[in-house]
Image (cartoon, grey):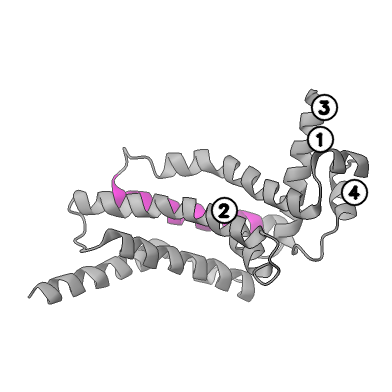
Amino acid sequence: MAKAKDTKALLLKTAMELIWAHNYGSVSVDDICRAAGAQKGSFYHFFSSKQDLAKAAMEHLWTELQPQLDHIFSAQTPGLERLRNYAQFSYQAQEQEKRKLGFVTGCPFTTIGSERCSEGDGLTGTSWEILLRFKKYFTLAIRDACEERAIELDNYTDAANEIFIHYLGCNAAARLSGSLEPMKDLYEKWCAILGTMSKKRRKDAA
């Protein structure tokens, strides 16, 4: 039983690594089985198709990331500090992947979801649903920053949306350009966005 669980976990991990590093269309079931050292029969014992595996792999990656996010975005940490800590974590994680693979990987959920958006196979929906879970961390951090009076905003959800979109855009730009430059100084950029929205609030109030 333990061996079966290990094989499934290895297939999930391997699939995510290959698809993220290359793309969904270019990675075959044979490629995944070969890299995982698993038999094709084992693959079809756990998954009905590559699409089924890819969805499960994204959920598996999210499950692995969540404890880190819960720690970084702990409610015990001031809201703006959470954003700063995540910005640093995100850059360092991308830097580590670049050293390991030789190129910038960007956000796995955005990469896979964008590739499959015209295919109607459900992968884009899965990617977006996971990203919305991730967005909640930003939303709560900015909400708490407002309650702590670190910033003044009329609508913290609008601010979270702006920063979330900015973050996804920076990940995409980093992967497309092959450079981590777009991922630098994320916290300072987010503070500028929040500052602009706060100034607009004061201007409208006046």
Q: Quadrant for the N terminus, please.
A: top right
- Residue receiving disc 2: 93
Q: CA distance from mark 1 to mark 3?
A: 6 Å
Q: In the image, which residues are magenta?
A: 78-98
Task: Mark 1 and mark 2 in contact? Answer it, CB < 8 Å.
Answer: no
Q: CA distance from mark 3 to mark 2?
A: 30 Å
Task: Mark 1 and mark 3 in contact? Answer it, CB < 8 Å.
Answer: yes
Residue 198 located left or right of residue 172: left
Residue 31 located left or right of residue 9: right
Q: CA distance from mark 4 to mark 1?
A: 12 Å
- Residue receiving disc 4: 34
| Element marked by disc 1 | helix
Task: Mark 4 and mark 2 in contact? Answer it, CB < 8 Å.
Answer: no
Which of pointers 3 and 2 indicates the residue nearer the eye?
3
Q: Nearer the viewer, residue 171 or 38?
A: 38
Q: Position of residue 72 (x, y in %)?
A: 43, 44
Q: CA distance from mark 4 to mark 3?
A: 17 Å
